[in-house]
Image: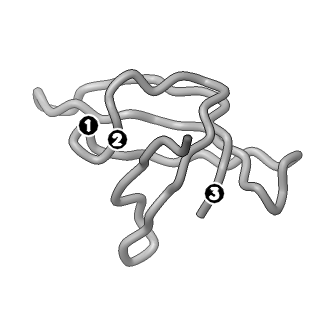
Amino acid sequence: MEAILAAIQPYDIHGTRYFKILYATKDQPDRMTEGRVAAEGIYRGAQPGDRIDIRFLLGVIDEVTKLD
């Protein structure tokens, strides 16, 4: 799913890094959605304003990649 990254916040649970992200989809640019992704599932240097592709597995964010 194509989206725009609006915010990103790192946090740790028992020493494992995760990121809370806020994003708006291409289809609904005025609606913000919150999600969480493990550190290995998101590209390095993610910044608000990036165009991203979000891949889900069983309804959970599995991977976030940056679009050119």
Disc 1 + disc 2, Cβ < 8 Å = yes
Eyeballing the image, is 52 above or below 6? below
Residue 7: which quarter of the image?
A: top right
Q: Residue furthest left?
A: 15
| Kind of residue indicated by mark 1 | Ala
Q: Position of residue 24 (x, y in %)?
A: 73, 46
Helix, strand or loop at mark 2: loop
- Give the crowd class for mark 2: few <14, some 14-19, many >=20 residues within 10 Å: some
Residue sitting at 29 percent across and 47 percent down?
41
| Kind of residue indicated by mark 2 | Ile
Helix, strand or loop at mark 1: helix
Q: Earlier in the sequence, mark 3 or mark 1?
A: 3
Residue sitting at 66 percent across and 50 percent down?
3
Eyeballing the image, is 61 above or below 33? below
| Kind of residue indicated by mark 3 | Glu
- Give the crowd class for mark 3: few <14, some 14-19, many >=20 residues within 10 Å: some
Residue 48: which quarter of the image?
A: top right
Tell me the mark number nearer the camera, choosing from 1 and 2: 2
Distance of label 3 from label 1 (alpha carbons): 19 Å
Residue sitting at 15 percent across and 33 percent down?
16
Residue sitting at 84 percent across and 57 percent down?
28
Would you name the residue on which mark 1 appears?
39
Q: Position of residue 12 (x, y in %)?
A: 24, 26
Q: Residue furthest right?
A: 30
Distance of label 1 from label 2 (alpha carbons): 6 Å
Give the label on residue 2, or none: 3
Q: Relative to residue 35, is residue 16 drawn left or right?
A: left
Would you name the residue on which mark 2 appears?
42
Count of numbered circles in the view: 3
